[in-house]
Image (spheres, rainbow, N blue to C red):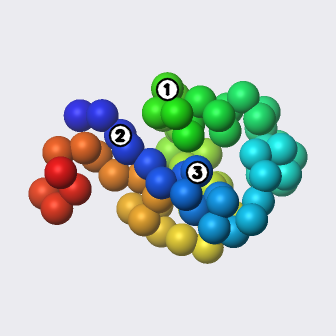
């Protein structure tokens, strides 16, 4: 099942740029772009770091497409 995410929406709501987020998480801006465009699924470790960064649950940011209630 494909993974969907709300990263772009959440990042913009927090007024954080891709560059700032990438620097804070010690990853590349290209990684942020790929995740936001659903071209890359982050590792579990990175997904947990991103959720902690925004003080949200992983499930609030990432969902499986086709999961009940997420269609």
Disc 1: which residue: 39
- Image location (x, y in percent) of residue 54: 64, 67
**Which residue is rendered at x = 17% and y = 45% of the image?**
66
CB atoms of marks 2 and 1 within 8 Å: no
- In the figure, residue 65 lies in which quadrant? top left
**Which residue is rendered at x = 58% and y = 62% of the image?**
10
Whether residue 33 is visible: yes
**Which residue is rendered at x = 76% and y = 59% of the image?**
16
- Image location (x, y in percent) of residue 6: 48, 54
Distance from disc 2 to disc 1, alpha carbons, whole Å, reads 10 Å
CB atoms of marks 2 and 3 within 8 Å: no
Q: Residue furthest left?
A: 68
Whether residue 48 is visible: no
In the figure, 51 relative to 22: above or below?
below
Disc 3: which residue: 8
Disc 2: which residue: 3
Q: Secondary structure at mark 1?
A: loop
Q: Residue furthest bottom?
A: 55
Distance from disc 1 to disc 3, alpha carbons, whole Å, reads 13 Å
């Amino acid at each position: 099942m494909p993974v969907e995410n709300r990263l772009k929406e959440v990042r913009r709501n927090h007024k954080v740029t891709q560059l700032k987020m990438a620097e804070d998480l010690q990853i590349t801006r290209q990684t942020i772009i790929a995740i936001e465009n659903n071209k890359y699924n982050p590792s579990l470790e990175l997904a947990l770091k991103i959720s902690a960064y925004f003080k949200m649950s992983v499930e609030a940011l990432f969902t499986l497409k086709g999961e009940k209630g997420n269609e």
